[in-house]
Each structure stands twice: as structure tokens, then as C-alpha cells.
Amino acid sequence: MRLADKVALVTGSGSGIGQAIADRFAREGAKVIVNDLYRERAEETARRIAAAGGEVLAIQADVSQSAAVQALVEQGLATFGRIDILVNNAGASRGDDILTFDEATWDWNLAVVLKSVYLCSRAVLPQMIERGRGAIVNISSVNGIVGLGEEAYSAAKAGMNVLTKNMAVKYGRFGIRVNAICPGTVRTPIWGPRVEHDPQIFERLAKWYPLGRVGEPEDIANAALFLASDEAAWITGALLVVDGGLLAGSYRMTLELEGQAEA
Ligand SMILES: NC(=O)c1ccc[n+]([C@@H]2O[C@H](COP(=O)([O-])OP(=O)(O)OC[C@H]3O[C@@H](n4cnc5c(N)ncnc54)[C@H](O)[C@@H]3O)[C@@H](O)[C@H]2O)c1
């Protein structure tokens, strides 16, 4: 059990990647605080974990709201006494091109994706500092590194990446590690509207991935488990790209350079 006796708070764990992380952490012995904006989603993940014999607490909270985050962390601490691991996973995206979305959309993306990380981190850090240990894993995106559209969301993810590094530098001396995972396309409900519009989207996107497929939530949960565990004891401030090779380079361009471009 790689997380025996650890208490983990996983935001947005009522669905997709967060749910896979919560499930995996519980299987590795962690007591898990499951959070989601939607109560029924948080409770569903908690039911799965409890049914598998895990210790779990479900809390509805909007992690972009300061008072809600404070109440979430207080309730978690009142139940389990401490929070050893924070996974800032909650996220969503609205709007695409800066010329087509409005200011409210920009603000919304920044609040849900980036401000939430600031709010949750500042709420859990004091008790981590007091105990001289802790691990924070931020679920960022390849969109925070290169241009792939969804500009407001992507700018927020880029902010998350540099916030990760600043927190790593500042809190390392208190035994706290802060890392981020940058996933490529992962098959989760966040893609629902796009799948509805184009049922073959994952198959079409797969061709951009050197490993020939899009990711599954468990691919990200495996990386989160590693970064949260003591196996990553000397890793902090890292951006771990988990993307089937997407950012490694371009196969199409390689062929072009070698004069073998496909028609
Ligand atoms: N799926 C992908 O292709 C992909 C790629 C890169 C990064 N990510 C990131 O992974 C994380 C998880 O995404 P997912 O694909 O599992 O999506 P998802 O929609 O399946 O799950 C996200 C969960 O977060 C919750 N949530 C949203 N806003 C919230 C808020 N303000 N407070 C609390 N909970 C909130 C949602 O209700 C939902 O249950 C996100 O940060 C996303 O940006 C996803």
C-alpha cells in the first residue's frame, strides 16, 4: 500500500481523472476526501470507494469560491485530523478564441482553473507546514505548455505550471513537494459536448499521438499516485507530461524532413 495512513483531498473527483485518482489512492490505503461541484457526483465516487472497503468523505464545494474552500478543508480536517496530499484536479473549460468569448468567460476560466489552486493550496498548506510534510499534485494540461486552442483555459493552466514551481521553491524547506501533471487528451466526460458533435473525435485525435491512442483516466491516476507517494521524495517543481508522446515532436514533420511525407 503506497499511501497507507495518508489523507488525500482530491478536488473535482466526482468524474473522470479525479475519480480515477480518488479510486486509486483509496486502493493504495489513503483516506480520501472526495470533492465536487455536484453533490451527487461526489457521493457516487464516495459510494464506489466505500463499497471497495475504503475510508472516504464526500463534500460538495465550488473550489473557485474562497468561503466554500475554507469550509471544505475545515470539514476534511475535522473528520480525518490532517490532509497529507492535495490533488488540485477540478477544472473545466469554456470558450475558445479570444475574439469570440466575452470577459466573463475569461474570468470564469481563470477562477475555476487557476484561482481554485491558489485557494485550495493556501487552505491546506498551514497544517502541512506545521507537520513538516505534504504533497500537492496539480492536474494541469499540455495546453499550459503549447498552443492548442481554448485560450483562457490554457492561459490558466500555464499559470498553474508556474504557480507549481513557485510553491515548490517556497515550501520545499518545510518538506512539502509540489508537482504538476500535464495530460494530453484523456477520455473523460469533459469531452461530452465534443463527442456528441463528433462521435469519432478520440479516434481522429489518436493519430497525433506517437503511442497511437488517447489517454485513459487511469494513465493520469498512475502518475498522480507516483508523485503523491514517497517514491517521489526528491521530486518537486516538476511538470510531468503524460501525453502519449504528443509534445515529444511531430511524426508528420519528421517524415517531411526525411523526404517521405505521406500524401
Ligand atoms: N480530459 C482531458 O482531455 C484533460 C486533458 C488535460 C487536462 N485535463 C484536466 O484534468 C482535470 C479533470 O478533468 P476531467 O477530464 O476528468 O473532467 P471531468 O469533467 O470528467 O471532471 C471534472 C470534475 O470537476 C468538477 N468541477 C468543475 N468545476 C468545479 C468547481 N468549481 N469546484 C469543484 N468541482 C468542480 C466537475 O463537476 C467534474 O466532476 C481538469 O483540471 C482538466 O482541465 C483534462
Image (tube, helix red, strand yellow):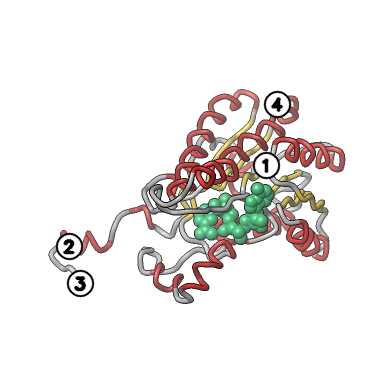
The answer to whether marks 3 and 1 mark residues whose Cβ atoms lie closer than 8 Å is: no
Q: What is the CA distance from the residue labelled 2 to the residue labelled 3? A: 8 Å
Q: What is the CA distance from the residue labelled 3 to the residue labelled 4? A: 55 Å
58 lies left or right of 165 = right
Location of residue 245 in the rendering, given as x and y in whole percent from the top left corner: 39, 57
The disc at residue 262 is 3
Q: Earlier in the sequence, mark 4 or mark 1?
A: 1
For the point 20% across and 64% down, the residue is: 255
The residue pinned by badge 2 equals: 256
Q: Earlier in the sequence, mark 3 or mark 1?
A: 1
Q: Amino acid at mark 4?
A: Ile
The disc at residue 86 is 1
- Disc 3 under 8 Å from ligand 1? The reply is no
Mark 3 or 4, which is nearer the eye?
3
The residue pinned by badge 4 equals: 129
Q: Nearer the viewer, residue 54 or 42?
A: 42
Residue placed furthest toward the right: 79
Q: What is the CA distance from the residue labelled 4 to the residue labelled 1? A: 13 Å
For the point 53% across and 35% down, the residue is: 164
The answer to whether marks 4 and 1 mark residues whose Cβ atoms lie closer than 8 Å is: no
Label 3 residue SS? loop
Q: Nearer the viewer, residue 97 or 19?
A: 97
Q: Amino acid at mark 2?
A: Glu
The answer to whether marks 3 and 4 mark residues whose Cβ atoms lie closer than 8 Å is: no
Q: What is the CA distance from the residue labelled 2 to the residue labelled 4? A: 52 Å
Observer able to see residue 97: yes
Location of residue 226 in the rendering, given as x and y in whole percent from the top left corner: 59, 48
